[in-house]
Image (cartoon, rainbow, N blue to C red):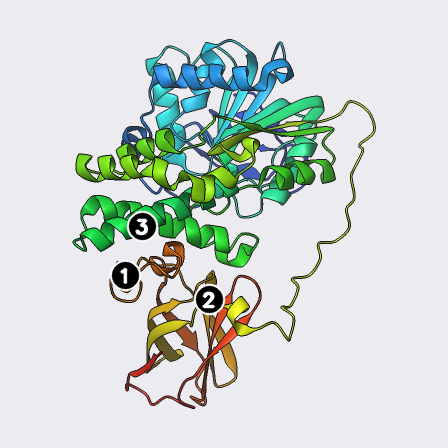
Amino acid sequence: MPLGQFQCPECQAPLIGSPATGVLCERCGARVPIDDGILDFVHGPIGPVSEPEDYDALHHIDDVRSVARYRNLKRLAGEHWPSSLGSVLEVGCGTGLLTRALIAEGEATDLVVTDIFRPMLRATREHLEHAGLLSAIPLTFATHGGTEPVFRDGAFATCVGGSVLHHMPDVRRFLSNMFRWLKPGGRAFFTEPNLRYHRALGQTLADILALLHNEDPTYSDGKQALLNLVSQWRRGILHQGDLAFLTTLEDKHMFASDAFEAMGQELGFAKAYAIPTSYQPTGVGFVGALCSQLNVGEAVRSSVLGLLPAFTDRYLSLLSPRDQTDSFLFWLEKGTGPVMRHFRGPPAPDAEPPADLPEAFRTGGLPPRWWLELTATHTPEGISLRLNGWCLVNTDVKWIRVTLGGVTRQAPVWLPRPDVQGTINTESVYASWNALCCGVNETLSFDDGPLDLTIEAVLAGGFVLPIPAPPGLQLNEPVVVTQ
């Protein structure tokens, strides 16, 4: 277990020792826990969302796909790919999809494999052992969540990750740290989802699902699975940049190509590229893969794929050629000379809508509709407010904002509500993207105090829409607000 790339997370001094004798800091003596041969910098019984075996089955991970994906990354990188990857740090290994190929293809001189979940690291090691790759190059396994200060500056020539950045709460902070971990001339690459494509495809799928629902309001598991996915995409897209909210989600980010490239340059990287991983102008291939992953039945799958070409012009055709891909290979290179940073100044604050803007423009030209039920109960911690229902505006609604006794809380609007499509939007005058994903169901906590009430809908464009409501609540007495 090579330790030269690590440092003490407490005082940043070198680590010494071995798995047999223990690993500790040579300066302050702090010990690093070792769990089954894995350096544990995260600490605590953190486990994966799914078991490694289920993860492999869900993502169709095997040795053949590992090598194929690795070689495809080389093809996409083209002339940027180096003759040797040198010392490699892999972030978020999962069950070893990239790890196996990094070793099998013989382009890494040594490898530090990390994941926040110990069971995933064990599964990766088992896969390597089964493939006869465990002793091919110097190899170290460690838990790491992306923020722990455990790597020495200039320790690695390459940092890689497959579909890992979108899980990290603070991507900018991670990339800033990674810049220090890389040697001059080093590089990093990651494959991550394209925000613009997912929004356009999500709107396309919403229109198709609304049409299918109008034809047959019986919701099958397949249609529900696709609607759940569209709703999750919509929730994440509407809240991009809101780190406090995104930390509650497993999939936290999607990325716009130009914004990522600008961030890489601002952090000091000499080169920052967003390389499309595929060309999906119609979405047929991507949606077909999603249907397989979600176990969508053949009848629904055929209906959705059959309708896709007719709906492509509404949204997907509006994307630039570079954005007609579901994901990017993000490629970053650290320069060999002085760091050149591109300062663009602080981001502009969110602009308030003009005060004289007609409400029809603010709400998408149609009257907003809602049905909200609020029930306040007393708990040992204070007041618990149950908020359930839906809010349909012909533009994106991010939150229902509730103020109780002068204290404000927010509930995200995103849950699937096909019943609203079937009763309010049968003529599809409201955008399906909004009608199908307009549900809210949240319990909000308040301190004890007055129960005077204010309700507002917060729109993505910055406009706040007042929702008429009674001036106050009574404990244990549900109140319905509707329009």
Q: Which residue is mark 1?
A: 426
Q: Is residue 220 above or below residue 353?
A: above
Q: What's the amino acid at mark 2?
A: Trp
Q: Which residue is mark 2?
A: 399
Q: What's the amino acid at mark 3?
A: Asn
Labels 1 and 3: the sequence-earlier one: 3
Mark 1: give few (<14), some (14-19) or many (20+) Cα within 10 Å.
some
Q: Is residue 457 above or below residue 121?
A: below
Q: Is residue 102 visible?
A: yes
Q: Which image quarter is the C terminus in?
A: bottom left
Q: Is residue 131 above or below residue 269?
A: above
**Toward the viewer: 322 or 452?**
322
Nearer the observer: mark 2 or 1; the answer is 1
- Please name the residue shown 65% across and 32% down the image: 26
Image quarter of residue 368: bottom left
Q: Is residue 351 above or below residue 102?
A: below
Q: Which mark is residue 116?
A: none
- Disc 2 and disc 3: Cα gap in Å? 18 Å
Labels 2 and 1: the sequence-earlier one: 2
**Residue 56 place in picture, x, y as percent:** 31, 28
Labels 2 and 3: the sequence-earlier one: 3
**Toward the viewer: 306 or 284?**
306
Secondary-structure class at tag 2: strand
**Residue 133 place in picture, x, y as percent:** 41, 12
Secondary-structure class at tag 3: helix
Q: Is residue 91 visible?
A: no
Q: Which residue is mark 3?
A: 228
- Please name the residue shown 41% across and 30% down the image: 121
